[in-house]
Image (cartoon, rainbow, N blue to C red):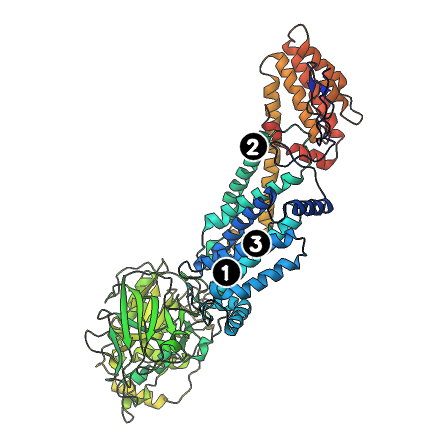
Amino acid sequence: MTAQPPAQPGQPAQPPAQPGRSGQSRPSDHTTGPARDSTAPGRTRARTSWTSTRSRLAATSATSGLRPGGAALVDAAFTAVLVGVALLGFRTDFAGAAWVLPAVAGLVLGLLATHVTTAYKLPLVAPLAVVTVLYLLLGGPLAVRRDLVGGVLPSGQTFFDLADTSVHGWKRLVTLLPPVDTGNGLLALPLIVGLLGGCVTYAVARRWSSPYAVLPAPLALLALGIVLGTLEPASLAVQGAVFAVLGIGWMVVRAARTRAPLQNGAGQRTRYGIGAALIGIALLAGYFVGPQLPGADSTTRLVARSHVVPPIDIAAFASPLAGFRKYTEPNPAALWDTPLLDVRGLPAGTPLRFATLDSYDGAVWGASERANSGSLVPGASFQQVGESVSTKGPGRKVDVRVSVPQGGYGDVWLPTAGTVAGVKFAGARADTLAGRLWLNIDTNTALVPDRLEPGDSYTFTAYVPATPEKMPRSLSVGSGSLTDEVDTSFLDAKLDAFSGDAPDPWAQFVSIAKVMAGEGAYTDGGTPNSVERYYLPGHSIGRLSRFVGLAQLAGDDEQYAATLALMGNRIGVPTRVVMGAITPASGPVRGQDVHAWVEVRDSQGQWQPILPDNFLPDRDKKPKELQTKVEDRKVGALVPPPAGVNPPSVLQGPDQAQNATNLKKPPKKLFDPSAWPWWLQWLAVLGLVLLALVIVYWLIRGLKAWRRRRHATRGPPASRVAWVWADLMGSARSYGHRLPRRATRLEQAGAVHGPIDLRPLAARANGHVFGPGEPSIEEAAGYFRAATAARADLRANADFWRRLRSDVDVRPLFTR
């Protein structure tokens, strides 16, 4: 035996060597001295307690002061990257990249504050107090730059703004339409998230040794960034795959610091292979199973601005359609020939929208609080906006300047056109109007509660498509209705007569519009002494019941547009009303240019305008005199809406609907998961997950059995026997037996505890491997059967969890 060299001063004594099979000395696998350095290749540190971790941190800080060690630098790097990925969610909230500076500065300051307080062994509350002070002192120059003293030092107003933003800024952020302007103080929010994210995540990493404790904080920040963001994700690849890979990698690195020395013979390459295989399985499972999970539909992305109640009540503002007649002639308002708006930059004939009205309550068409189902912007509502809006629509981009002359337009609804991409006010009230501008990006309806007044002016940027003068012959329209909550069955008699034998919903809609324009009459109510005075304004159910109940339709834009929209929804074509003006070729917009028209939603979710010339009769076509006299006798009579369900007639059986539309609910599809209740969907998902686990379980067991048989039947018989023994030892380790890695077969067999004696099998393997002759194929096959029986005995003497862990252990698949 070779003598061991004497230990050097300051070094621990080397453990005694163990003899190998060839008689040479081998180093022992059992380390009884100090824990091994986690930075050494292929070695791991024994699990340590919190007390030992604190002692180690104290010793480190005592010797190196503020200089971070290798583990601290690794934790700081992972903290910076993971929190940085979470901060990426603010990219869709703010205009430009101004948010990056406060976010990165907050992250760096949070890391530094935590490192210093940890080095001096201060309590956990210390870094939180430090970042609070840093927020108040540096928040002004970094985020809230107004009211600074000398452009650098914070003032009392700066402290107030920072405190107010930390409490109320979150609600303001989700009620403003993104991208948010950076001059309103909300840049303090990414500063707060960066400070707290870096502080909390790094503090947990340095004060707790658990590898799993470091992920909750970055995960919470990632979820916060998504919830505060928009329906358009900042980056699916970075926020999804990159975050997951880095998070798992950090846990693996931290677990390696506290993992006990491995006793199963698995090398570093094997662990890498296992890790890669598990990541591959997770990616495949996420790709195939993820889209099937409830809530995985991209249209149901959960963001706060889709559910928060806007701090404005749209119902408090009167529908502009209800006041349509003030723009007609004759009318006491005398706006027929009065200049209302001076519009420059908008092509002639382009509709200038006052408001899009997509909600009917039985009394008026009004603007809804939120987007209807089927919208391209689900959950959209009226939100405050700045000068720019992150939207883009069909058509060419135009800049339109609008000004209000004396005696002109005065309402809360801001005239715009196309898809609005920005609004900038000018004049004495510019700041007031800009700070109170609300926009619904689904309907492109803008609102200023302070009302436009003479002298106000603004410029809006919009994408304006070409306006079709006539209705297309064919159009793939969407399906659904915006008026399901209102009974509009009083229209069915006219629907049957107007739609005729049209084969599809769009053809029916076109037929209805043509009949209105061809057979109807136009009246604004006439003068007070005119016989037309009995044709009253309004578009409630009672008023429209009288409108469609006459032999000849008679009314103005208000009644025709409201009725056509209700009929369109009745036949299953989503239709809404728009109140506005048609831009004249020259001169200002006057009252005579104001009209109401409708829009229908096509199968792609786009809204196609149907201008008034397509369904309004000629203005000179007045109602018949006989009908006017009949209406004179009816005036003042209350016409209640008809019953929701009509009694059966001789033409229809009692089991049929009296109305022309199909009111029966479509049959439920038994095998359509979207039609199942939520609990059944989750039960199905759980069943699929369990089925996938069972398949993976038997697949691993089958692959290992196939590999064992393959190695036991190929190659020289002696090599077969050696491989079978090595595989049996791998199984023994997976069942919990602590076996030395560098030992003879007899020594390994002696280390197997319990009633099982593997020494005869070890001696038999030595005889086949080191014997004078090559064993026969039959002897190798017999040894394989004996090893299989021994493996069954090892399994029988292990508990359930040991057996399960051994069954799913994939390391034998990577051993040679």
Can you say whether 126 is above or below 271 in the image?
below
Residue 775 at x, y = what percent?
65, 9
User: Circle 3 is placed at which residue position?
Assistant: 112
Q: Nearer the viewer, mark 3 or mark 1?
A: 3
Q: Is residue 24 left or right of residue 650?
A: right
Can you say whether 315 is above or below 218 in the image?
below
Q: Is residue 611 visible?
A: no
User: Circle 2 is placed at which residue position?
Assistant: 273
CA distance separating discs 2 and 3: 37 Å
Which structural element holds mark 1?
helix
Looking at the image, is mark 2 or mark 3 earlier in the sequence?
3
Camera-side residue of 675 and 386? 386
What's the amino acid at mark 1? Pro
Q: Is residue 310 left or right of residue 70?
A: left
Classify the position of the N terminus by image quarter. Answer: top right
Q: Residues within 10 Å of mark 1 (few under 14, many from 20)?
A: many
CA distance separating discs 3 and 1: 17 Å
Q: Residue at x 63, y 11 (%)?
A: 777
Q: Nearer the viewer, mark 2 or mark 3?
A: 3
Which structural element holds mark 3?
helix
Can you say whether 56 is above or below 650 in the image?
above
Q: Residue at x 28, y 94 (%)?
A: 529
Q: Quadrant of residue 377?
A: bottom left
Whether the residues at callouts 3 and 1 have beta carbons within 8 Å, the answer is no
Camera-side residue of 5 and 143? 5
What's the amino acid at mark 2? Gly
CA distance separating discs 2 and 1: 39 Å
User: Circle 1 is placed at which residue position?
Assistant: 190
